[in-house]
Image: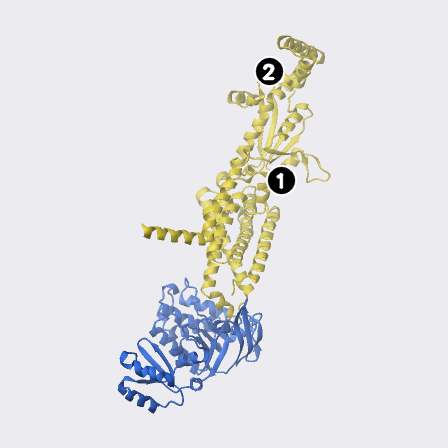
Chain colours: A yellow, B blue
Amino acid sequence: MRVILTLVRKDIANFLRNRPAVVITFLVPIALIYIFGFVFGLNGKDNGPTGIRLGVVNESASPAAQKLVDALKGEKTFRVISVDYTAKPEHPLTEADARRLIHDREFNFALVIPSDFIPDRGLGLRLKILSDPRNEIETQTVNGLLQKTIFSNVPQLLGQSLQASAKRFLGDERTKKFNADLAGAVTSAFGGDAEETRQTIESGGIGAVLGGDSATANTQPKADFFSRLVKIENVQIAGKDVKSPAATRVVGGWAMMFLLFAVSAGSAAFFDEKNAGLFQRLLSAPVRRSQLLWSRFVYGILLGLVQLTTLFCAGRLLYGIDVFGHFGNLVVVCTAAAAACAAFGMFIAAFSPNAQAANGLSTFLVLTMSATGGAWFPIGLMPEFMQRIAKFTLVYWSMEGFSRVLWAGNSLVELLPTVGILLAIAAGVMAVAIWRFNRGAVFD
Amino acid sequence: MLITRDLVKRYGPQLALDGVSLDIGRGEFFGLLGPNGAGKSTFMSLVAGLRPPDAGSLTLDGVAVTTADPSTRTALGLVPQSIALFEDLSAEQNLRVFGELYGLRGALLRERIDEALEAVQLADRRRDQVKKFSGGMQRRLNLVVSLLHRPKLLLCDEPTVGIDPQSRNAIFDFLEARNREGLTIIYSTHYMEEATRLCSRIGIIDHGRIHALGTLEELLTRLPFADEIAFPATPFTAEFAARLAEHGELTTADGEHLFRSRPEFKTSAFYALAEECQLPARLFVTRRPTLEALFLHLTGRTLRE
């Protein structure tokens, strides 16, 4: 028993001295659990996603439309964008603006409330949802939440629809008399102020009688009933012609994660060469330190380019992803993404004292970057501040590039901003890495 | 060929080289002998241009060696202490990589690779991965990689660490042959046998300072005794050993006494005293003093410390 205890004590001491192992064992899971907690609503009292950008085009002059807009603005899930902020001066969003902004990836969803939101003939409402469903989970979530918000307000909105119809068929005077009589009947039966009840009925409050408690309006039988009354036209702005939507959506994320792992393994190999005395030997030849670093960087880019291209080609073979239809642009994005990843690998090597530390640091960063950058699930499902953090990760911009090529079919010119950001990340991270290499002891 | 003046190198508070000045001529086989941590590898790294000195100067054929300018390095070959090879690559691929880094191309490179592999008896294993080689084979390849570009000066930093005697002898033969062809070699070691066998001139280094410099014969004249006499350490010789102590330096190790006499204590007096103690002459073995003894004399430490 004493022998076993001694050996156990030795293992514990070894483990505690190996800081990278401690980080991987405790810190990485905690960080990932925290990130997943945001997605699944475990952090804080508010559940579910918040701040999903939703364009709202209100072409209707009816107060009911404005009520719907107000209701959407009251939902924490959405951040309603009702003006074209890219135009100078800003102006209320039109459908054409919304289509353009969705195409430009300013937001992925827009609700259009058309001028015939409450049709002249018949009872019901008309709405149009514009979307770029590049992420299936996010699309389903947004559609569900939009329908919930609309249906929650349908009784009120339908009341207005009924009032409008009544005015058309009965005329103003008769409708007013009808409303006054109805208010009188309601107050005589249930009490209350007759004038107040009349005003409520005229503003559409009668719909509550049809729909009952709006808070329960999304229950299944009522939802079915409302779905017959509310005609929602879904218009897909991007990705209509994508051959294999599900695979096209996910392949970029997985490809990026594995590339980062491959590059990280290269960082650890850096220390193997150092420990073997190879740096000494190489630097005793007519080789400069900078040449040694840049050769690693170029190798990282080549490795990344080949790996990403191979993975996308595998996606073509296995799932029919349209790789060859956009091959040129895909190579451009892959090269920029590979450059950013190679710089990341150099960064890991520059800031790690040894191979073990490099492995620990890279595992931590790769997993957290993949999670926050959207490689595993859509960042739209995370809180707004996490979405802002995501934009500082190379995973986010790489996936954005892949999505623009394979999903939206963007041209090379349209890709330039994303490619530019990836190259800027590569340049920035590489500059920090070289600064660190020059100050560190890697070459000693 | 190589001139160093007052080289100083510090690592934080630790002084690794403390004013080292050396003149190494063309064709010399110069040995740098000292224990671990004496400053040998630091000296090598400064000559190879891997690190800058904190003070002092270093010129190779009149050209200053600096870390910033790699041009002087084509004249150098460094054999590091570790086996600095790409172990997943083959012997031939390793030679090709380093040959190309030194500017060799095409037929000339192929010719040099063939010569190098022949010279270290690895021609038949040229396409094997280096990690599949024995330690001795790796050491031989480690050596020959540094000679591919035909340097004027070869820096060997303890190139035989951890290998079998056969491979060690093969490396010695190889280096001696290259030296006979005119190659200047600086060889650092803590094995006095290596320095004794190989080097035409030896510098004894400890704590970053050169304590003695010269040929083997010149160095040994610095000892205050001519010979060492060994005899068994037994109860039978105990009285004799006690009486000898006043005439010189007596050390005991591994069941053996080693006596180094003072100059005034003649060999005849030694044997007279032995006869007085009734010890037969066949008990005694006279040896030539070694660099180990010189090192002990100069520094008060052994080379293995």
Report the front residue among A223 and A43.
Answer: A43
Mark 1, secondary structure of its residue: loop
Q: Identify the residue under disc 1.
A: A106
The amino acid type, in three-letter code, at marker 2 is Val
Q: CA distance from mark 1 to mark 2?
A: 40 Å
Answer few, some or many: residues within 10 Å of disc 1's Cα (few below 14, many 20 plus, some between 14 and 19).
some
| Chain that bears disc 1 | A
Camera-near label (1 vs 2) is: 2
Reply above or below: B132 against A405.
below
Q: Identify the residue under disc 2.
A: A209
Give the mark nearer the N terminus: 1 vs 2: 1
Residue at point 70%, 39% (across, down): A87
Q: Is residue B163 left or right of residue A49?
A: left
Report the front residue among B268 and A384.
Answer: B268
Looking at this view, name the residue that lies furthest to the right.
A89
Which image quadrant is residue B31 in? bottom left
Q: Is residue B47 left or right of residue B252?
A: right
| Chain that bears disc 2 | A
Report the front residue among B6 and A364.
Answer: B6
Residue at point 45%, 42% (across, down): A319
Which percent across, then down, holds residue B214? 46, 84
Residue A347 in view of the camera: yes
Report the front residue among B260 and A401.
Answer: B260
The amino acid type, in three-letter code, at marker 1 is Glu
Reply above or below: A125 against A363.
above
Mark 2, secondary structure of its residue: helix
